[in-house]
């Protein structure tokens, strides 16, 4: 794999964010020539400190994926695009559906048009989301599960993903999608809970706050540590059998309560309380989710490697050392 | 049903088009107060002559569904919205994907936001399309069939439809979708074949041209005469059990060749030839399609009433009498 990525020209949208920056570090260390696109919108996950370990060997280009002019230029002369820019917030997508549409739907189409016109040889790994499925009709959820999102974000991400598969089928632009589930670990923004609740629990515990779990706290989520997700992205980008395919990723099915209890155990202190769902969340809540990721394993050999305890330890350690860059 | 619609305030987007105008005439004759929104974009289906029979009892408002300001106002003070504005062209959606996105995706979201903010009591019947399914994985296609479109139009229509179902579920705005298949009959535009091929065959036969069928001509389509489609829309709008649901409509499964042969028989003359698929159509061709419309029948009692021969006779008659308004 190191051989594959050595000297490869790789573009990462959302590359200053949580998963994008972790991926950028890994690829840069394997010898890839990495260019990062990020809009640095304050509410989102971009943070220059995230790429500190490779800041001298990656190129950072501040631009928004809604800017067609810059993407038309930037996609050129790259071998691979890891297309991770996107909004993730379920609640924000309901209060501001048009921004969600512009970023997750319109911009995906314009990125693909840019590739079709200016670099049809590029290979694209798109970051999908389990939010595309909506409420699970059965568990574990495989890739054939109906796509019935419970919020605007999921609808737009379905369109964004399907454009990729369509451009693969019609124009031969090599593209695949990895439908991600809840991911936690270092480099996630820590300013608000709207882009992923797991790291928010970690911040609350670090601050000595009581963690608030909605409903019963028994909702099952299929949790991944960020390094495992990045490993899957890297495997997909270097595998020529994956184009035109969509893949689930998943790993550790635990209830949110169990996640918080594990975090409290490792932290040595902390408490949580169960509170009713706020109205705007109750309406879009998806219930339990467990992914069937056999297809990903079959195509790439991927398996999750980092267990919950180890992931939590690494995460606490990172934020304790670097708190001033995230709080 | 006449009682239900008498004095109802009904808004129809795309109301000067093929299906919209046929619906407007039916509703106006039942005593509904009909307002039509149409952009009159020359390439699309809008034609003022279409509503000639009711021109003095309907209100025509020329505006585009992309114009949020006008829709914010126009949705007010209406009981029902038949949301038929949309582009249908598979090929156009590939050559100009952004226009397709703006009309079928963005504008649907802004229409729903307009309803949520200014008229949450309105009921909406949305015009979906069999194009949302892509290639049939089994026949007949029921509403649970996977949605895997083969063109940008289908992807955007999926998003447009899902916004409706989501706004029903989250905000209680009563909305349902009717996934239409190939429809033919009077009032369809006759200037080009990109919004439905059946009426184009009819024009070709009327002009003494050889009809060109792509591939083998054996592709099965599930064909409806326009009056039957309008009957289904009217039934849905007056039924309080349909909100939040999606329905297939279908009727006469025939090959395109059989359709043309039936038309030639009724016309008494004409010929066709089989030609290879043009490249841009081959890539997005969906193969055979037959709808399972049992759900629609179960909820509303709808059945197709007009057989192919009768529909063709009416269609030829209409265009013979009114050719100057369509050619």
Image (cartoon, coloured by chain):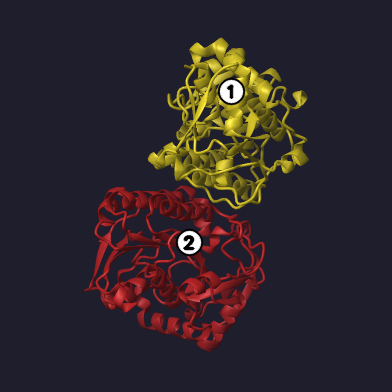
Chain colours: A yellow, B red
Q: In the depicted view, which residue is nearer to us: B22 or A93?
A: A93
Q: Which mark is residue B245?
A: 2
Which chain contains the residue that carries disc 1? A
Q: Quadrant of the C terminus of chain B?
A: bottom left
- The residue mark sitting in front, 1 or 2, is 2
In the depicted structure, whether residue A322 falls above or below residue A312: above
Q: Which mark is residue A4?
A: none
Crowding at mark 2 (Cα within 10 Å: few <14, some 14-19, many 20+): some
Tell if the residue under mark 1 belongs to the same chain as the one under mark 2: no
- As measured in the structure, the alpha-carbon distance from the residue carrying label 1 to the one carrying label 2 is 42 Å
Q: Residue furthest bottom?
A: B268
In the depicted structure, whether residue B63 falls above or below residue B260: above
Q: Position of residue B30 (x, y in %)?
A: 29, 77
In the depicted structure, whether residue A199 falls above or below residue B9: above
Q: In the depicted view, which residue is nearer to us: A120 or B68?
A: B68
Instruction: Please say whether residue A305 is visible from this viewpoint.
Output: yes
Q: Position of residue B170 (x, y in %)?
A: 42, 49
Q: Position of residue A192 (x, y in %)?
A: 45, 26
Instruction: Please say whether residue B18 is visible from this viewpoint.
Output: no
Q: Residue furthest left?
A: B56
**Residue A30's quadrant in the figure?**
top right
Badge 1 is on which residue?
A: A21
Residue at 57 percent across and 38 percent down: it is A218
Residue at 50 percent across and 66 percent down: it is B247
């Amino acid at each position: 794999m190191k051989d594959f990525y050595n000297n490869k020209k790789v573009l990462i949208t959302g590359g200053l964010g949580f998963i994008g920056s972790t991926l950028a570090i890994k690829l840069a260390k394997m010898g890839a020539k990495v260019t990062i696109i990020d809009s640095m919108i304050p509410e989102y996950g971009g943070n220059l400190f995230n790429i500190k370990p490779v800041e001298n060997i990656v190129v950072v280009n501040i631009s928004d994926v809604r800017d067609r002019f810059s993407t038309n230029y930037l996609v050129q002369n790259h071998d691979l695009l890891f297309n991770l820019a996107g909004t993730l917030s379920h609640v924000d997508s309901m209060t501001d559906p048009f921004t969600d549409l512009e970023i997750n739907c319109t911009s995906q189409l314009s990125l693909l048009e840019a590739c079709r016109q200016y670099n049809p040889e590029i290979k694209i790994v798109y970051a999908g989301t389990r939010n595309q499925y909506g409420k699970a009709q059965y568990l574990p959820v495989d890739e054939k599960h109906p796509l019935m999102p419970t919020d605007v974000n999921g609808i737009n991400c379905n369109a964004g993903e399907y454009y990729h598969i369509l451009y693969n089928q019609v124009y031969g632009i090599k593209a695949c999608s990895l439908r991600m589930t809840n991911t936690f670990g270092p480099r996630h923004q820590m300013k608000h809970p709207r882009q992923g609740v797991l790291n928010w629990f970690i911040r609350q515990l670090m601050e000595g706050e009581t963690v608030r779990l909605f409903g019963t706290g028994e909702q099952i989520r299929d949790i991944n540590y960020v390094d495992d997700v990045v490993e899957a992205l890297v495997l997909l980008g270097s595998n020529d059998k994956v184009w035109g395919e969509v893949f689930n990723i998943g790993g550790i099915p635990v209830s949110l309560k169990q996640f918080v209890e594990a975090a409290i155990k490792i932290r040595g202190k902390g408490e949580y309380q169960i509170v009713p769902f706020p109205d705007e969340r109750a309406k879009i809540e998806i219930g339990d989710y467990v992914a069937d990721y056999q297809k990903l394993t079959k195509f790439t050999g991927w398996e999750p490697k980092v267990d919950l305890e180890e992931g939590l330890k690494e995460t606490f350690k990172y934020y304790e050392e670097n708190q001033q860059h995230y709080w």
